[in-house]
Amino acid sequence: MQARLSASRERILSAALALLAEHGYAGCSVAAVAERAGIATGSVYRHFPAKATLVAEVFRTVSQREADALIRAAEQEHGAPARIAAMIETFAGRALRAPRQAYALLAEPVDPAVDAERLIFRRLNHTTFAQVIADGVADGELPPQDVEVSAAALVGAIGEALVGPLAAGSAGPDTIPALIAFAQRAVGAGHDT
């Protein structure tokens, strides 16, 4: 019985993940999730008492996947400027390849429970940027700065710069290079420390 319940829950989450990627938060209704999962709507409610509860779980899953990709990007490079570039290429590249999902994660109006997950997602990204900036300052690659403010500003600026292209479903070829150049200037990469 427990295995069947677990499998049903996984089918529901898988269906909700697919709908979020295709249609965003607005298209992720309980009825649509049930239909995609091939189960009755009431079965969804057995696992998740409300749409917000279900979508909050989906946001947690997707956010963690995206945050892990950012961490991997940071770990694959050496030096703060290269690490920042890799992180932005990864974050923006993944967002632009899945614009509907990224827009839902970053900007689509959502229920308060889901918005709380969005804040956690931003904090995860903030933490990764803060560590890279702190490492760069410690290594003398970046000038002394308030690491927390710099990281928060980068996360906010990158997300805001992507909202328009994500809503439109496309970005110009210079979007990612421009974001990288902006971020590196913002933290003082290439300036005498």
Image (cartoon, rainbow, N blue to C red):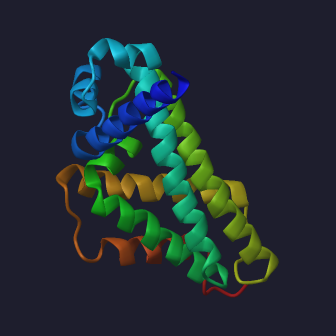
The residue nearer to you, when weighing 39 against 189, is: 39
Q: Is 33 in front, or is 181?
A: 33
Q: Quadrant of residue 146?
A: bottom right
Query: In this figure, what is the number of numbered marks?
Result: 0
Please determine whether, in this image, residue 39 is positioned above or below residue 131. above
Q: Which quadrant would residue 41 be assigned to in this image?
A: top left
- Residue 48 shows in this picture: no
Q: Is residue 37 left or right of residue 125?
A: left
Residue at the front extreme of this rendering:
1
Residue 51 on image: x %, y %: 37, 20
In the picture, measured across the screen, residue 88 lies left or right of residue 28, that is: right
Give me the residue at 44% from left, 33% from top: 7
The residue positioned 45% from the left and 69% from the top of the image is 90
Residue under the point 59% across and 77% down: 83
Taking depth in this image into account, of 131 and 11 the one nearest to the observer is 11
| Residue beneath the point at 77% across and 83% down | 140
Front position in the image: 32 or 180:
32
User: Does residue 106 sit above or below 139 in this rendering?
Assistant: above
The location of residue 27, given as percent across then percent down, is 22, 32
**Is residue 180 in view from this perspective?**
yes
Determine the residue located farthest toward the right in the rendered image: 138
Q: Does 4 sit above or below residue 102?
A: above
In the rendered image, the quadrant that contains the C terminus is bottom right
